[in-house]
Image (tube, rainbow, N blue to C red):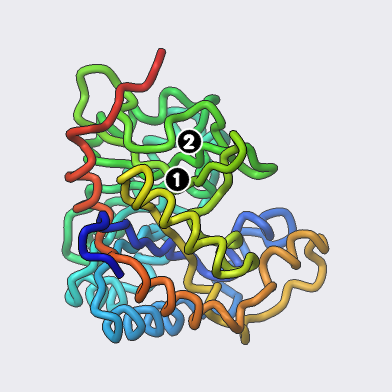
């Protein structure tokens, strides 16, 4: 760890194993209350890991989860971590429309604030689903008083992505303080590579993530944004037998090694909360090109 390098954003997208995009076509939302709830035990593991490593992070939480786990929300806040919004029930932004999106984030924010006793200033869209199809989403976030978003993946991917978006902090609306902090990408041979965590971190060798974050920190002098999910450290979670093979490979590969890789990553770089990163980056955020 180099004390002269930027403080990166450490974030957890708080959703349970049955709420992920990979299973949205095979697990009905109506069945969620009947399924094994593992999010609290997994978040407790993450809190212990963060405490052992002496780091603070941001927990982007579904309102659905916060409403059912108020004790967990208060525990996260009491330990000095930020609690932010991940929407109500992991519905992608482009499926909601502007009115539905406004209702979704308002409902989630109320549930999270009521459960945690803390103000929610940040938002991350489920599956990074703010993209070129949803220019109205930032306007809704601004209207509801959010300080920052971390909802854009500036890559091309079969599930998400906004390839033309800036790689680093930008102001999506003219004359507005709202700042977007995209998830991290690295560059190689003129191509953008996803390097901000999730399945890419779990499946690929650790050396790739170390190289990518060093590139961002040392060569570009910018902070990285890293994310993962509570279910990714849970190799004992239930298996979804009728999910597509591609989804199962993405979801279940290397669950048993994830906690160890996280510990190594946290030890190799500097980490902090997303709200603090957004405040530092706001001053050099670029304007989104029209």
Q: How crowded is mark 1: few (under 14 residues within 10 Å), some or many (20 or more)?
A: many
Residue at image coords 46%, 39%: 152
**Earlier-in-chain disc, 2 versus 1:** 1
All told, the count of numbered labels is: 2
Q: Quadrant of residue 66?
A: bottom left
> Does residue 83 sit above or below 206 in this rendering?
above
78 and 256: which one is in front?
Answer: 256
* Secondary structure of residue under mark 1: loop
Left or right of 238: which side holds 7? left
Q: In which quarter of the image is residue 272?
A: bottom left
Left or right of 100: which side holds 286? left
Q: What number is the disc on residue 130?
A: 2
Left or right of 46: which side holds 285? left
> Does residue 91 sit above or below 273 in this rendering?
above
Question: If the image is split into quadrants, where does the C terminus sit?
Answer: top left
Q: What number is the disc on residue 125?
A: 1
Q: How crowded is mark 2: few (under 14 residues within 10 Å), some or many (20 or more)?
A: many
Q: Position of residue 80 (x, y in %)?
A: 18, 71
Q: Distance between the residues labelled 2 and 1?
A: 6 Å
């Amino acid at each position: 760890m180099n004390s002269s390098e930027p403080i990166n954003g450490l974030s957890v997208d708080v959703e349970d194993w049955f709420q992920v995009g990979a299973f949205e076509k095979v697990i009905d939302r109506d069945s969620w209350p009947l399924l094994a709830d593992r999010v609290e035990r997994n978040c407790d593991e993450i809190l212990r890991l963060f405490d052992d490593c002496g780091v603070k992070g941001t927990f982007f939480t579904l309102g659905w989860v916060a409403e059912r786990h108020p004790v967990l929300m208060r525990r996260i806040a009491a330990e000095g971590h930020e609690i932010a919004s991940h929407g109500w029930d992991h519905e992608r932004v482009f499926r909601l429309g502007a009115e539905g999106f406004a209702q979704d984030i308002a409902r989630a924010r109320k549930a999270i604030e009521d459960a945690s006793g803390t103000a929610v200033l940040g938002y991350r869209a489920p599956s990074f689903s703010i993209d070129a199809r949803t220019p109205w989403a930032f306007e809704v976030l601004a209207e509801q008083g959010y300080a920052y978003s971390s909802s854009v993946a500036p890559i091309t991917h079969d599930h998400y992505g906004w390839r033309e978006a800036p790689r680093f902090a930008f102001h999506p609306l003219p004359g507005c303080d709202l700042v977007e902090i995209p998830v991290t990408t690295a560059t190689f041979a003129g191509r953008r590579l996803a390097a901000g965590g999730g399945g890419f971190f779990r499946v690929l060798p650790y050396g790739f993530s170390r190289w990518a974050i060093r590139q961002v920190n040392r060569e570009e002098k910018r902070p990285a944004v890293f994310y993962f999910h509570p279910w990714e450290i849970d190799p004992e979670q239930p298996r979804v037998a009728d999910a597509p093979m591609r989804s199962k490979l993405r979801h279940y590969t290397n669950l048993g090694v994830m906690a160890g890789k996280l510990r190594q990553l946290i030890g190799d770089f500097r980490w902090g909360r997303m709200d603090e990163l957004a405040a530092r980056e706001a001053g050099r955020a670029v304007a989104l090109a029209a």
